[in-house]
Amino acid sequence: MTQTNADDEQTPDDVFRTAVAVEAGLGALALVLGYLLGPSARELVPPLSEVASSAVIGGIGLGIVATVPLLLFIAVLRRVKHPAIEELDKLSDHPMIGLMLRLNGWELFAISLCAGVGEELLFRGWLLPWLAGDAASLAPDLEAPSRWWAYGGWLGSLPNSVTEFAWPEEGLMAWWSRVGGWELTAAWLVSSFAFGMFHPITKLYIAVTALMGLYFGALLIVSGNLLIPITAHALYDAVQLWGAGRAVDDDEEKSDHS
């Protein structure tokens, strides 16, 4: 029986470099596909300009808020007694994930940030609009004033003042039907399914990730601001990785004391 050479074994640093390269590569792929095939994911990201600065700050802020439902959903899901769900709690036993959880907090945050940016640029920024085609235009009206809560979409028609708050005259479903109809709905569903299939860890994990894809896609469609799902995705990943890493450290401390 041969032993694996120590030089051939992966280290946490190897996993870090690979994860960052893969996730950043997805973002680069999205930009290349947008350039070659259109549409460009950059159109859904508010620029750092005086006109759109409020949408940048608001997008990040709302993305932070949008993380809360995801964390609550996972917390409730983990309370369900089922073998498939219990299997999710054992993902740290996977060699690669186990190595990743040995990274420090800043390294885990860097991976999460790359995942949020890269995956959202590809699946929501490029794939969803590309699948919808000419039937739906998610890009904002650059001549319209930018709102802190949206860069376009259904919420972009809200009055640009807190004191003048009122729901849009056109309902969400009517707006959705007008701007995209079944083409937008199909693109939303297919891009979310593709997002789930990109995470083939377990069958349940694929399903959960696909549901998250629907959530991220809805955030983009109603706001036109890709910064919202990017922030929510990155922060969710960071919290989950940090929590899993802490759990592994606690288990190791208990085993050392026993």
Image (spheres, rainbow, N blue to C red):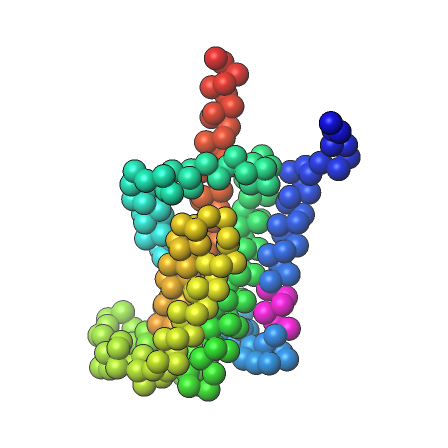
* Residue 220 in view (yes/no): no
Seen at 60% across and 62% down, the residue is 26
- Which residue occupies the foreground of this view, 62 or 161? 62
Q: Position of residue 8 (x, y in %)?
A: 75, 37
Q: Is residue 1 above or below residue 227?
A: above
- Which residue occupies the foreground of this view, 41 or 29? 29
In the picture provided, is 75 more to the left or to the right than 210? Answer: left
Seen at 42% across and 41% down, the residue is 88
Quadrant of image for the N terminus: top right
Seen at 47% across and 19% down, the residue is 254
Q: Furthest-top residue in view? A: 258
In the picture provided, is 124 more to the left or to the right than 98? Answer: left
The answer to whether residue 29 is magenta is yes
Magenta stretch?
A: 27-32
Seen at 43% across and 51% down, the residue is 203
Q: Is residue 207 above or below residue 96?
A: below
